Amino acid sequence: MMREEGQDRQHKDRSGKGQAVPALDLGTHPGHLARRLQQAHTLLWTTIVSEEVTSPQFAVLNALTGEDGLDQRTVGERVGLDRSTIAEVVRRLVARGLVDKERDTKDSRRSVLRVTEEGARVHHKLSLRTTRMNQVFLAPLDPQERSVFLELLKRVSDAAEGLR
Amino acid sequence: MMREEGQDRQHKDRSGKGQAVPALDLGTHPGHLARRLQQAHTLLWTTIVSEEVTSPQFAVLNALTGEDGLDQRTVGERVGLDRSTIAEVVRRLVARGLVDKERDTKDSRRSVLRVTEEGARVHHKLSLRTTRMNQVFLAPLDPQERSVFLELLKRVSDAAEGLR
DNA sequence: AGAAGATAGTCAGTGCACTGAGTATTTTGG
DNA sequence: CCAAAATACTCAGTGCACTGACTATCTTCT
């Protein structure tokens, strides 16, 4: 098994032309870490929660469980998906029979969404599993660190939300 | 300009069957927050750093700036991209003329990557801008919170890395 | 040397995420 | 009332990210 700690003894070679501009350490860049965090989460989700239903799909199911009969755009806004992406996600949920979609009779621009019986069952089952996943995900942190982490995560995300 | 608060004048009906399973508050779920964080970052990246070169592309450029002549798989490993994704990203970098790719003469399975002159220029320019972006991204946190945030982010990401 | 295994990369398929353009419908203002 | 603006959605295009199957090449072990 090879060790992977090549980052320190980085030969300061200057491959031909002298490296005027050094490489950055992306391990200290929040954006890069955010991407890796999200990848890690997706991995845990598929192994612990579900291989069929993705995390964004679950978010939509969850929003509709809270309040049935919302239109597509509103659901997208609640879970943080733009109009095109929410359409894609809903399309899959409908294809899997977890959500019903029909035109609003009052305003035929809108699509009204509703969780099916099966959708409710799946939501229930996955809800339980998300708890386990969250534990595994946050396992490297002790209890106070976890709440700090969640709070900071939320503050940064919410702030950027306002810039859209 | 219409306000966007239409979500309240909505029937709080309980669509027939009484909501046995309540909806979760995903605002407390690290996975959901991770996704939103990453979306926020992408948005900031395109507005502040570059519309042409994406953040993963920059990560690859940065890795090669540190150490020219790595093979594709190694670069992917360093920046956290699997073999298929790194291939895609590299393909685009080559298409934009920022990276050169050629077969290793010693081991013809490998593709050896190298930053072009143009790639080095672009890396330099974007490096400066990432600093500004990081400031904006972390603006909602005060200085101590920032370092705590980065550290926790890193711990959680690294831990999940081990589970791959 | 030759078969078995490991390794690097490609390719097809699925899915999230965004932009910009376009359609249909509703609302609003003169 | 009716044209203009706003709204909800669709569609095409780009790009990241992963899996599983496949090819080519190199290494190892007998």
Image: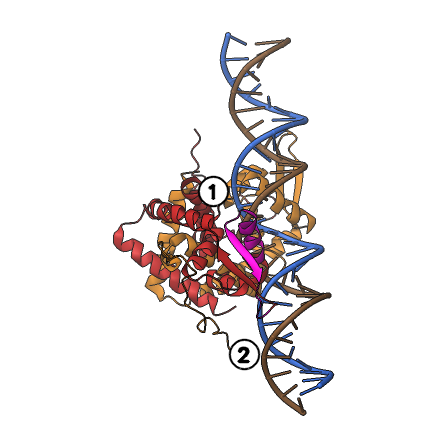
Chain colours: A red, B orange, C brown, D blue
Measured Cα–Cα span from mark 1 to mark 2: 56 Å
Identify the element where label 1 is drawn: loop
In the picture, the quarter occupied by the C terminus of chain B is top left
User: Residue B136: horizontal and vertical position, in percent?
Assistant: 46, 67
Nearer to the camera, A92 or B120: A92
Q: Amino acid at mark 1?
A: Gln
The quarter of the displayed image where residue B150 is located? bottom left
Range shown magenta: A86-107
Residue receiving disc 2: B2
- Mark 1 Cα shell of 10 Å, populated few (<14), some (14-19), many (≥20): few
Residue receiving disc 1: A10
Nearer to the camera, B135 or B106: B135
* Viewer can see residue A17: yes
Q: Nearer the viewer, mark 1 or mark 2?
A: 2
User: What residue is drawn where x is 57% and y is 59%?
Assistant: A102
Say if labels 1 and 2 share a chain.
no
Up the image or down, A84 lies above or below B61; here it is below
